[in-house]
Image (spheres, grey):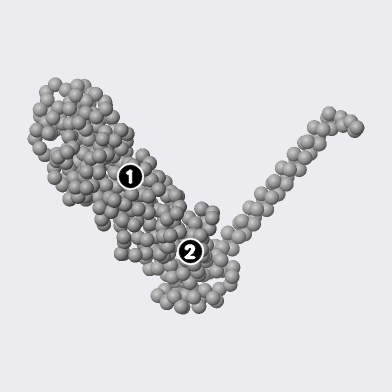
Amino acid sequence: MINIPFVQIYELIAYISLAGLCLVGVLTLGASGYLWVRDTFVRQTVASLRPEIVAHAGSSEQDWEAWVNERSRLERRILRREVPRQLRVVSGSYATQLKTLGRALGIDERADRALSARIKQKRLIGLTQLTLLDQAVPLQHVRGTECPRERALAAQCVISDSADIQPESIVRLLLEPGTPLPEYGVYTLYRVMQQNPLSLLGVTDDTTWDLTLTVQVLSVLQYIDYSSSDAIRDWIGARLRDEQPAVRAAAVHALGPYIRAYAMTPPEVDPLTIVRDPSIRVRAAAFQQFPAIEETTVRRKIVDTAVEESNETVLLIAGQEFGTAISGTHKSITPALRRSMAWARATNRRRTTRWRTPWALEWEHQPLKTESTPELLSEPRPTGEHA
């Protein structure tokens, strides 16, 4: 048996560690150099091809195919990677040219094949590329998947590809799994239901929905004019009796279009029960939506309930929405409500005064965010999970 001194063992470990560090450093530098050379070559290639792409503006698809055939294999590979990237950030006539170029490069055919891949990431990339190229998606590829991202992308493709939308099919595609939607899925649902609000009903069993999905659907409804649909009104009313406060609060917000249209709550909904709900979120949502109610007796009872409110967060909303009514009918109010009303008056003065400091201007243009404020859409759009 060989006896190795204890000190020599430590030296051997140190030498091996140093050699490993040197190897990792060399590999890192080599990889960095390779990636830098590759990216530089890609940028130079794209820059050299861009004038030719612009020069082919308005060309037919056959002309694009002839131009693509003249390119080298490496140039075509670079273009297949860069065209989808560019389509994410450009619009107008240049985007139309790139879409035609993408089809000439066969990106749509590759994306179609990717839909049958076992790896989910490849399927998502294929759906994304078809969406960017405004190409149709064979829905049989995604009907069997439970992935909400795949279904949302497929629904977005259907909308982009055809103006003749079948709302029930798209809503079923989005909501059938019962799992939360990504943000672009919520926006797609908004676009479909804006065209036909009744597409929500009868296409799926909402008893299997995840809590977040129920809140998402209700958040869509607060931006949809469904006031003439008794069926949707009844569906929202049933959500007001849900045991989850988040669902009840979202349902109160969803009553907004009906209240604004008729200046009252639906006959089967008792507004006093809502403003006395045990949940802070539900009461806050009620005081945001109920200022549009015009019936005198109901408004007076809502104001009386606001005076008795104890939560300061809810009082801020009540003071802002019902401050004038409270001042006119109640002489004795709590200090917390008085502070809330003073804050509301100060905020209104700051927003309406002719002379504004830079701080006041910055304050004025900050978006007023609530739990249901849309984040993604340029027009009022409901929220959702990040893609």
- Look at 30% across and 57% down and name the residue there: 167
- Between residues 159 and 9, which one lies in front from this camera angle? 159
What's the mark number on residue 206?
1
Instruction: Locate the N terminus by quadrant.
Output: top right
Residue 180: x and y, percent?
39, 45
- Residue sitting at 27 percent across and 50 percent down? 201
Would you name the residue on which mark 2 appears?
A: 112
Of the numbered discs 2 and 1, the one sitting upstream in the chain is 2
The answer to which image quadrant residue 260 occupies is top left
Query: Label 1: few (<14), some or many (≥20) within 10 Å?
Result: some
| Residue at image location 76% in from the left, 43% down from the top | 19
Q: Find the residue positioned furthest to the right.
A: 1
Q: Residue at x 84, y 32 (%)?
A: 8
Q: Position of residue 384 (x, y in %)?
A: 37, 45
271 relative to 34, above or below: above
Amino acid type shown at disc 1: Asp
The label shown at residue 266 is none
Please identify the quarter of the rendering in which residue 54 is found: bottom left
Left or right relative to 85: residue 210: left
Residue placed most toward the observer, 249 or 142? 142
